[in-house]
């Protein structure tokens, strides 16, 4: 299941606003750009470049990132537009690993605090 339309960042002008005016948080797995909104809505845009891999690889990564965002989005505070740009080395990470990375990034960005989400270890399924 894809990311609901209401959670997607759409339009070139919106992407450019986030990339140019937003604050950025780089990691080894990618860079998160965040632009604060006046309302309480959250939108995620993904910029997955061709250097990540072929279309199948890029689409698989996009689906993983969207799934993680859908899980965490209800816990986010304040309205923000976000763009995440993954690095080529991150294409093989699992959903669980992405969830940990996004939690860490969102905490660094001040979008969630330690008390809102359960500890990272509680979400990991050992199956």
Image: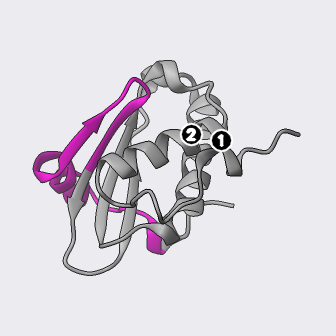
Q: Residue furthest bottom?
A: 39
Which residue carries the number 1 mark?
A: 95
Q: Residues within 10 Å of mark 2 (few under 14, many from 20)?
A: some
Residue 33 location (% of width, % of height): 26, 46
Q: In terms of depth relative to the viewer, which is nearer, 36 or 10? A: 36
* Mark 1 element type: helix
Please indicate whether residue 54 sits to the left or right of residue 17 in the image. right
Q: Residue placed at 47% from the left, 20% from the top?
A: 88
Please indicate whether residue 102 sits to the left or right of residue 121 in the image. left
Q: Residue placed at 59% from the left, 58% from the top?
A: 118
Above or below, 101 against 9 in this view is above
Residue 24 location (% of width, % of height): 22, 42
The span shown in magenta is 6-33
Q: Which mark is residue 98?
A: 2
Q: In terms of depth relative to the viewer, which is nearer, 10 or 79? A: 79
Q: Residue placed at 16% from the left, 52% from the top?
A: 22
Please indicate whether residue 43 sits to the left or right of residue 68 in the image. left
């Amino acid at each position: 299941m894809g990311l609901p339309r209401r959670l997607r960042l759409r339009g070139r002008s919106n992407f450019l606003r986030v990339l140019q005016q937003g604050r950025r948080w780089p990691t080894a797995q990618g860079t998160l750009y965040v632009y604060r909104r006046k309302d309480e809505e959250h939108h995620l845009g993904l910029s997955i470049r061709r250097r990540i891999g072929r279309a199948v690889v890029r689409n698989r990564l996009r689906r993983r990132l969207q799934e993680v965002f859908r899980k965490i989005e209800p816990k986010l505070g304040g309205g923000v537009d976000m763009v995440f740009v993954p690095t080529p080395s991150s294409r093989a990470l699992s959903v669980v690993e992405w969830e940990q990375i996004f939690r860490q990034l969102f905490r660094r960005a001040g979008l969630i605090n330690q008390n809102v989400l359960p500890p990272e270890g509680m979400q990991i399924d050992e199956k």
